[in-house]
Amino acid sequence: MDALKYLAGYPEHLLSRVRQMIDQDRLGAMLADKYDRPNTVRNDAQLYDYVQALKERHLRKSVPLGKVLYDSRLQVMKHALGTHTAISRVHGGRLKASREIRIATVFRDAPADFLEMIVVHELAHLKEADHNKAFYQLCTHMTSDYHQLEFDLRLYLTHLDLAKR
C-alpha cells in the first residue's frame, strides 16, 4: 500500500521531502506545531452553527442549508471528506429542495484549520458544482491559504494512515 496515496499528483521534489520527514519520524510533530489550534466543534449542532456562520460571512445570497452534520459513514479511503447534496421532494403540489452538508467524523478530532478548509470546500459547492478555476477562486476568497491547508490536510491524513500501521 502506497504511504503517499493522498499526495498523488504532487511534484516529486515535494514527495521526497515528505518521505524524508516520514523516515525521520517528524511529520506528526511538524503538523502538531503548525496546527496547534484545537477543534472545538464537537457535535452536529455546533457544526451546523459553525457552517452557518461561515456561510453568512461569505455566501449570504446562496441557497439555505437544511442539514449539516458529522457523518461516520464517509470513508476517507474513498476520498470523501465531506459531501454536499441537494435533495428534492414532492411536497403536496410543489417541489421542495433541501441542501445538506455532511463532514467526515475524522474532522471532529482534526485541528480547527482542517475543519475550516473542508467546510469552505463544501460551501463553495453551493455556488460551483465542479472543481474548476471559479471553484478554487471562491475557496481562496473564503480562506486565503486554502491550497496550503489542502496540502497539509493530505499530510495529516497520511500521518493518520501511518499511525494505524
Image (cartoon, rainbow, N blue to C red):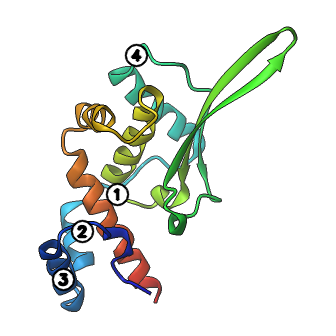
Task: Tell me the element at label 1.
Answer: loop
Task: Name the kind of residue labelled 3 in the image.
Answer: Met
Q: Earlier in the sequence, mark 1 or mark 2?
A: 2
On screen, 79 above or below 29?
Answer: above
Query: Distance between the Cα atoms at labels 3 and 4?
Result: 42 Å
Q: Earlier in the sequence, mark 3 or mark 4?
A: 3
On screen, 123 above or below 131?
Answer: above
Query: Distance between the Cα atoms at labels 1 and 4?
Result: 26 Å
- Find out whether the residues at labels 4 and 2 contact each other: C-beta distance under 8 Å: no
Q: Residue at x 50, y 32 (%)?
A: 49
Query: Distance between the Cα atoms at labels 4 and 2?
Result: 33 Å
Question: Which residue corresponds to mark 2?
Answer: 31
Task: Name the kind of residue labelled 1 in the image.
Answer: Pro
Question: Which residue corresponds to mark 1?
Answer: 111
Corner quadrant of residue 24: bottom left
- Find out whether the residues at labels 1 and 2 contact each other: C-beta distance under 8 Å: yes
- Find out whether the residues at labels 1 and 4 contact each other: C-beta distance under 8 Å: no
Task: Name the kind of residue labelled 2 in the image.
Answer: Leu
Q: Residue at x 25, y 45 (%)?
A: 146
Question: Which residue corresponds to mark 4?
Answer: 60
Q: Earlier in the sequence, mark 1 or mark 3?
A: 3
Instruction: Tell me where residue 157 appears, x and y as whole percent.
Output: 38, 69
The front one of 128 and 57 is 128
Task: Tell me the element at label 4.
Answer: loop
Task: Tell me the element at label 3.
Answer: helix
Q: Earlier in the sequence, mark 4 or mark 2?
A: 2
Residue 21 - label:
3
Query: Distance between the Cα atoms at labels 1 and 3?
Result: 20 Å
Instruction: Tell me where residue 34 appears, x and y as whole percent.
Output: 19, 62
Instruction: Tell me: 162 left or right of 49.
Output: left
Task: Tell me the element at label 2.
Answer: helix
Instruction: Tell me where residue 41 appears, x and y as whole percent.
Output: 46, 46
